[in-house]
């Protein structure tokens, strides 16, 4: 897969033949024809090339793989390519827009895989939303791929889909909306602690949003040893005494909120050390002001953070958002290319919790000598990121016993 971006208006100020009025907008002009192409990695210039790349030569390779299936990793692209799978039900901030409308995002994800991790990726937008149908479809497609990146699938279906695919497949399955966000958040939080002389174990955090990202962030923070974390949804703090919880939230309540908080998000923020926003809601300034001195505010909703950075900086020692026009962008592209590159490098059969924690630690270490309130996480364009994450994930896969080479 080639990741080169070609703008059809590079050589002329006039729209190309057949262009729509939308092509006046440079965003639409860039997307005309899509953002991906398939490129050959071998020559195909004459009959000799053809006989090697296709018939009759290809039959020898097929026969060898049929007799020894593990050769597929050596003699096809399988171990170098990821399927980016969506049903278009939870696309960015756009919601349920369907598979066709999700394709520009999936193409974008594929070029990020290539640009930042050297991993080829194929967008697959599925015309189904039923959990059983999605699982069966991906299982049937899996022989062509070395890993599956689930993308923009609405909660709570995304949890079941991921778990069932992990049970059925022997290749890495990773829901980036959950785990990519969690890895980058943990990395930034570790560095915020280092910068301010604190430890994770001393922090009480409040997460706004009990969807895919919120649940995964809570889980990884607990695994990393945070002092306490409470998660809130539209009805307030998720706790075991609530009778309106779905199975995912009931499980979430079983390992979070050890302080036994109830009530609203604003009430939970009183005295809290960390706010993590993945909800798209708005937090009143007086609630931020009520947090502990030197708090961390990670307001990651896009395009409008739950707390505007100008407000957050009045009260917080470290502020992060999901936007590229403010410092400390919590961007999944810092995680998923290197995580998959490391997993594919060792032909991992799964992505373990240890691999995610290793990715977060490696990501944090990239800027460990450069920490400041405006730098607790690297830039997505920092060339050190993907190699560091890749190496750490590969090593963790070996330590966790899921590496096959």
Image: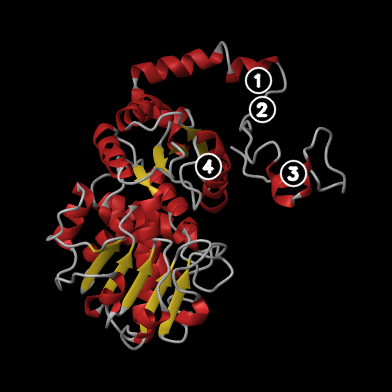
Identity of the residue drawn at 50% across and 44% down: 119
**Which comes before the other along the chain, label 4 or label 2?**
2
Closer to viewer: mark 1 or mark 4 = 4
Mark 2, other Cα within 10 Å: few <14 / some 14–19 / many ≥20: few
Distance from the alpha carbon under mark 1 to that under mark 3: 42 Å
Identify the mark at residue 43; answer none if there is no mark: 2
Is there CB contact under 8 Å for labels 2 and 1? yes
Closer to viewer: mark 1 or mark 3 = 3
Which residue is identified by label 3? 22
Distance from the alpha carbon under mark 1 to that under mark 4: 33 Å
Quarter the C terminus occupies: top left
Which residue is identified by label 1? 49
Instruction: Give x and y (percent) for residue 6.
Output: 72, 44
Does the image show residue 373? no
Residue 162 vs residue 397, the one in the foreground: 162
Distance from the alpha carbon under mark 3 to that under mark 2: 38 Å
Identify the mark at residue 338; answer none if there is no mark: none
Residue 349 vs residue 29, the one in the foreground: 29
Instruction: Give x and y (percent) for residue 383.
Output: 55, 62
Quarter the N terminus occupies: top right
């Amino acid at each position: 897969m080639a990741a080169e971006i070609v703008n059809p208006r590079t050589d002329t100020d006039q729209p190309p033949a057949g262009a729509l009025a939308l092509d006046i907008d440079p965003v639409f002009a860039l997307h005309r024809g899509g953002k991906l192409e398939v490129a050959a990695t071998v020559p195909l210039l004459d009959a000799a090339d053809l006989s090697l790349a296709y018939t009759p030569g290809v039959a020898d390779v097929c026969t060898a793989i049929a007799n020894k299936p593990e050769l597929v990793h050596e003699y096809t692209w399988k171990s170098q390519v990821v399927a980016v799978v969506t049903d278009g039900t939870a696309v960015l901030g756009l919601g349920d827009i369907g598979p066709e409308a999700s394709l520009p995002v999936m193409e974008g994800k594929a070029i990020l895989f290539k640009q930042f991790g050297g991993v080829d990726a194929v967008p697959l937008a599925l015309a189904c939303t039923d959990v059983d149908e999605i699982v069966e479809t991906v299982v049937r497609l899996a022989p062509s791929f070395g890993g599956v990146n689930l993308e923009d699938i609405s909660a709570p279906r995304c949890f079941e889909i991921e778990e069932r695919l992990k049970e059925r497949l022997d290749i890495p399955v990773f829901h980036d909306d959950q785990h990519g966000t969690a890895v980058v958040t943990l990395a930034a939080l570790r560095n915020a602690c280092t910068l301010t002389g604190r430890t994770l174990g001393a922090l009480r955090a409040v997460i706004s949003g009990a969807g895919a990202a919120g649940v995964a962030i809570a889980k990884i923070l607990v695994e990393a040893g945070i002092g306490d974390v409470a998660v809130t949804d539209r009805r307030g703090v998720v706790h075991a005494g609530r009778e309106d919880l779905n199975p995912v939230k009931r499980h979430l309540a079983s390992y979070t909120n050890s302080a036994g908080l109830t009530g609203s998000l604003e009430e939970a923020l009183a005295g809290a050390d960390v706010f993590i926003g993945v909800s798209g809601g708005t937090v009143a300034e007086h609630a931020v002001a009520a947090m502990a001195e030197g708090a961390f505010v990670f307001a990651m909703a896009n395009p409008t953070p739950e707390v505007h950075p100008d407000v957050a900086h009045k009260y917080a020692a470290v502020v992060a958002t999901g936007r590229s026009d403010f410092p400390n962008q919590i961007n999944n592209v810092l995680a998923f290319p290197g995580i998959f590159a490391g997993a594919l490098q060792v032909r991992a059969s799964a992505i373990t919790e240890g691999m995610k924690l290793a990715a977060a630690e490696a990501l944090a270490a990239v800027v460990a000598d450069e920490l400041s309130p405006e730098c607790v996480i690297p830039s997505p364009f920092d060339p050190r990121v993907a190699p560091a994450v890749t190496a750490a994930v590969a090593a963790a896969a070996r330590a966790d016993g899921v590496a096959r080479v």
